[in-house]
Amino acid sequence: MVLDDLGSSLRGTLNDLRGKSRIDEDDVGEVVKQIQRALLQADVEVGLVMELSDSIEQRALSEDPPAGTTARDHVLKIVYEELVELVGESTELPLEPQTIMLAGLQGSGKTTTAAKMAWWFSKKGLRPAVIQTDTFRPGAYDQAKQMCERAEVEFYGDPDGDDPVEIAREGMEATEDADVRIVDTAGRHALEEDLIDEIEEIEATVAPDVSLLVLDAAIGQGAKDQAREFERSVGIEGVVITKLDGTAKGGGALTAVNETDSSIAFLGTGETVKDIERFEPSGFISRLLGMGDLKQLSERVERAMQETQEEDDDWDPEDLLEGQFTLKDMQRQMEAMNRMGPLDQVMDMIPGLGGGMMDQLPDDAMDVTQDRMRRFDIAMDSMTDEELENPRTIGRSRVERISRGSGVEEETIRELLEQHKMMEQTLKQFQGMGEGDMQRMMKKFGGGGGAGGMGDLEELGGGKGPFG
Ligand SMILES: Nc1nc2c(ncn2[C@@H]2O[C@H](COP(=O)(O)OP(=O)(O)OP(=O)(O)O)[C@@H](O)[C@H]2O)c(=O)[nH]1
């Protein structure tokens, strides 16, 4: 994802500063060099890179670290604050009725984003609808309809219509009951005049409260011109950067945001309707620097728990803190984990685990883990209720039988039982703890991790930290 290299190279450099109480020009020079290299590689515009690195350099050398702060933490805080400043605020999108129009070049991800945003608003308790006005690309109608079905949100489009402005007008009438209307527009491969005319007409028809420009993270410096052009014709309140899950650099999009004084509203991180994140500058940069993003993580956990609970009325996650932890609990726990999304993305959000740890894992480590979880699941499906409730009764002959029944190797089943035992023991430690204890644990967990746990920033009291 964008600026990934910055995270890992910077962590190394900052670690070299560990233990130093003062930093000299050479130290700062090295940090600044790493930042410049990473930003330029990520396609951030040269002028912007220089501006940022000058500012970091000047602050790191002139500001005195607050008493008790190490040189490393001081520099980390400055880098963090300057990067947050670079990516800017998040686009204001209140959770209330509104019309949002999406614009952007062909293939940037508008249609996908429209459905994702609708899903996102629906999870926030609002009633969204997507209006598809793309009559230019064959297949756009079907794609949008399917995605909206998957997201379980209202959809309006006209597969036979050929006048986008007319469809937009009808769509606004047809979706009168919706709270949030998201209007998807057609893209072209370049910014042609008729595209601009069309978007201006749609804009006049739907009178959006917010217009967002959808930019592919892979776009380079061309992003700036696009952003300016759209800004001039319909006015852009914010940007959605898509495809951040890929190898895309993202710096072009960041530059465009900065140049046009707009801000980022959402990030697209995959092809399914759930792969969307509200942009949170501080969390985003924390994650980038390997400091985790607790806010995003807790949102995902909460959603996953809620969904698991919706499917299984009897289950209350709080029960985990009382009584026995059975294999059934573990299976539900795994379902909830699965719902949180790809493990590597989740790991990135955990302070102390993010970045630093990921760098040390082989690339396929996460796939192995997910595959293992799937096999555990299959094995558990072959167990009797009694075995699931009392895994300790599973001896060697039962392991053999479960293996035969499920096709999962005995070795894996033994690992599953081990894992259960470990989780059970861990939970025992939590049992009887009050909320305050839990928070202290979390804090300890965050502060203790390798290169720059969350605790670093909290203690510095930067006020802009992910908790701030
Ligand atoms: N990996 C990944 N793929 C994405 C993401 N967003 C969109 N895509 C893919 O990008 C391709 C283009 O996305 P669309 O939503 O069709 O783009 P569009 O801007 O509506 O395209 P036009 O209608 O032709 O203007 C599709 O194959 C999407 O699945 C993302 O965040 N990550």
Image (cartoon, rainbow, N blue to C red):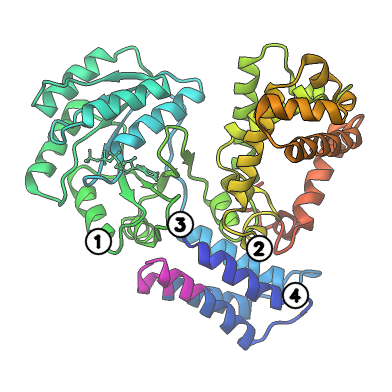
Disc 4 to disc 3, how far (Cα)? 27 Å
Dot placed on the residue nearer the N-terminal end, 2 or 4:
4
Q: Quadrant of ligand 1?
A: top left
Res 142 seen here: yes
Res 180 seen here: no
Dot placed on the residue nearer the N-terminal end, 1 or 2:
1
Report which residue position mark 4 lands on.
18
Label 3 crowd bin: few (<14), some (14–19), many (20+), radius 10 Å: many
Mark 1 residue element: helix
Viewer-closest of 418 and 101: 418
Give the residue displayed 75% in from the left and 29% down from the top.
330
Q: In which quadrant of the rendered view does residue 158 lie? A: top left
Label 2 crowd bin: few (<14), some (14–19), many (20+), radius 10 Å: few
Viewer-closest of 329 and 283: 329
Report which residue position mark 3 lands on.
87
Q: What range of the chain is rendered magenta?
A: 35-49
